[in-house]
Image (cartoon, rainbow, N blue to C red):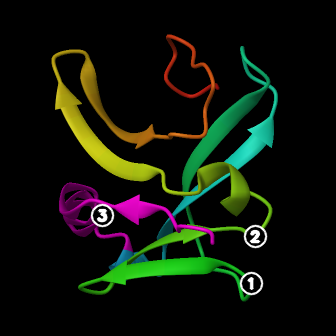
Amino acid sequence: MHLPPKVTDRAFARLTEIGAATQGQALRIAVEGGGCSGFQYEIALDAPKDDDLVLEKQGEKVVFDSISLPFLENAVIDFSEELIGARFTIENPNASSSCGCGTSF
């Protein structure tokens, strides 16, 4: 049984702040080959596609393509504001290792 990724209220709130839905955009979370450890996350605003898994709350959407989903099973998408900056983060229990850059696993 596959467990879909989860998106925190804080991540959805940030999408509302930047007006993603009003621009017809969703937060796309994808996994691509490359990066320091073999795979890297691609996080961008993008229009939802027909075959995406769409997680929605209060009109805001986070989308995942079918190829990336197995790599993101049970992952948590969040938004973090720290002294070094603010960014969307991914806590992924499937990543056997990660890199200091925060986008590679």
Q: Pick the residue in front: 7 or 25.
A: 7
The vertical placement of 57 against 1, above or below, is below
Q: Amino acid at mark 3?
A: Leu
Q: Please say whether residue 64 is one of the residues in the magenta stretch.
A: no
In the rendered image, residue 28, in percent from the top left (x then y), is placed at: 56, 61
> Which one is in front in this view, the residue at disc 2 or the one at disc 3?
2
Question: Which of the labelled discs sits on residue 15, or is there none?
Answer: 3
Using residue 40 as the reference point, say whether residue 38 is left or right of it: right
Q: Which residue is identified by label 2?
A: 66
- Disc 1 versus disc 3: distance between alpha carbons? 21 Å
At a point 63% along the width and 44% down the height, the residue shown is 42
Q: Amino acid at mark 2?
A: Ser
- Disc 2 versus disc 3: distance between alpha carbons? 22 Å
SS at badge 1:
loop
In the rendered image, residue 45, in percent from the top left (x then y), is placed at: 52, 60
Please identify the quarter of the rendering in which residue 15 is found: bottom left
Using residue 13 as the reference point, say whether residue 25 is left or right of it: right
In terms of sequence position, does the residue under pointer 1 or pointer 3 come before the other? Answer: 3
Q: Which residue is identified by label 1?
A: 51
Q: Are marks 2 and 3 in contact (CB under 8 Å)?
A: no
In the rendered image, residue 105, in percent from the top left (x then y), is placed at: 64, 26
Q: Which residues are magenta?
A: 1-20
